[in-house]
């Protein structure tokens, strides 16, 4: 026949149990806090990297805007020069057109130019 033995907690065992439970909770809480700190540090590094990328993009965007303005000004200047050169070419071409017209009329009336 088996006998069942039961142990009753003595008053001196109760503070030890509370201490053990508290110590176990402290270890779990410390582990959680350590994990939280590592995660926070990782997030801080990711945020810093994101801010650096944003700053770099802002600088590049500003450079591109400035360069775009320079290109627009150069394009306007070239359009103006093209208009001036077109007018000048038309002015130069008018006398030549008149010479061609005179040559054409001369051939119609029977005149030929000799050199």
Image: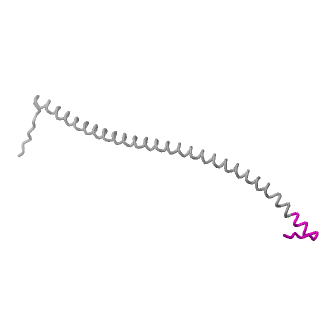
State which quarter of the image contains the C terminus.
Answer: bottom right
Residue 51 location (% of width, % of height) = 43, 41
Quadrant location of residue 20? top left
Farthest right residue in view: 109
Relative height, residue 62 to residue 103 (above, below): above
Q: Nearer the viewer, residue 67 or 39?
A: 67
Which quadrant of the structure image shows residue 35?
top left
Q: Is residue 81 magenta?
A: no
Snapshot quadrant of residue 15: top left
Residue drawn at x 10%, y 37% is: 6
Q: Give coordinates of residue 112: x percent, y percent.
A: 89, 70
Position above or below: 25 against 90? above
Q: Is residue 107 above or below residue 27?
A: below
Give residue 5's position: percent from left, percent from top: 8, 39
Magenta residues, start to end: 101-115
Q: Is residue 65 found left or right of 7 in the rendered image?
A: right
């Amino acid at each position: 026949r088996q006998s069942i033995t039961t142990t009753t907690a003595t008053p001196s065992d109760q503070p030890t149990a509370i201490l053990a439970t508290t110590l176990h909770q402290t270890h779990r809480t410390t582990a959680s806090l350590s994990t939280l700190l590592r995660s926070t540090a990782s997030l801080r590094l990711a945020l810093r990297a994101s801010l650096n990328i944003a700053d770099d993009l802002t600088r590049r965007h500003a450079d591109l805007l400035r360069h775009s303005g320079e290109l627009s000004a150069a394009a306007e200047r070239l359009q103006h020069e093209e208009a001036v050169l077109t007018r000048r070419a038309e002015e130069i071409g008018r006398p030549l057109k008149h010479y061609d017209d005179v040559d054409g009329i001369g051939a119609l009336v029977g005149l030929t130019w000799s050199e």
